[in-house]
Image (spheres, rainbow, N blue to C red):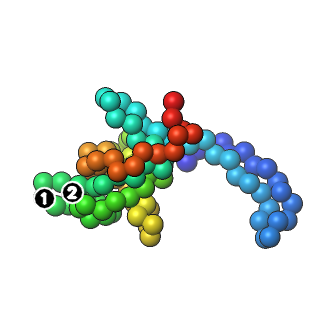
Amino acid sequence: MPDDDSRVDIGSFLGYTHLLCRPRFVAMVGEGRRLQVGTVVQLKADSHGYMRCFRDGDSVVIVGFRRPDTDGCADYVILASDGREVGEVKPQRIDRILHPGPRELAE
């Protein structure tokens, strides 16, 4: 992640000293489909039944995105969580959208 974070010092608040603001991607849009942070999706395995982080049919929440072909991520550009762990997912492993993300992020 780029080192262009902005910091806001908050003194000493319950053991925390600052808030960190970092630019991030919030949506991936194209070809009639929109995936955004907070979207709940169902995953599908490839034709061999393989999934890198999760299992076929798992429901996960999109928590972020990465730019393709940076930091060796190739096409694992979607960061998703099942509530226990965060994993990387390819866009083609998304079977269907179960619940769209929050309206605040809509265009």
Q: Is residue 62 left or right of residue 24?
A: left
Question: What's the residue type where badge 2 is placed?
Answer: Ala
Q: Is residue 91 left or right of residue 83?
A: left
Name the residue rendered at 25%, 49% in the picture: 95
Tell me whether circle 1 and circle 2 mark residues in contact (CB < 8 Å).
Answer: yes
Name the residue rendered at 43%, 60% in the picture: 81
Quarter of the rendering containing residue 55: bottom left
Can residue 79 be seen here? The reply is: no
Name the residue rendered at 26%, 45% in the picture: 92
Cα–Cα span, label 1 and label 2:
7 Å
The x, y position of residue 11, in whole percent, is 86, 60
On residue 88, the disc is: none
Q: Residue furthest left?
A: 47
Q: Secondary structure at mark 2?
A: loop
The x, y position of residue 22, in whole percent, is 63, 46
Q: Is residue 70 left or right of residue 46?
A: right
The x, y position of residue 94, in whole percent, is 29, 49
The x, y position of residue 20, in whole percent, is 70, 52
* Tally of numbered discs: 2
Can residue 48 be seen here? The reply is: yes
Q: Residues within 10 Å of mark 1 (few under 14, many from 20)?
A: few
Q: Secondary structure at mark 1?
A: loop
Q: Which residue is mark 1?
A: 48
In this orientation, which residue lies closer to the viewer: 103 or 80?
103
Q: Which residue is mark 2?
A: 45
Question: What's the residue type where badge 1 is placed?
Answer: His
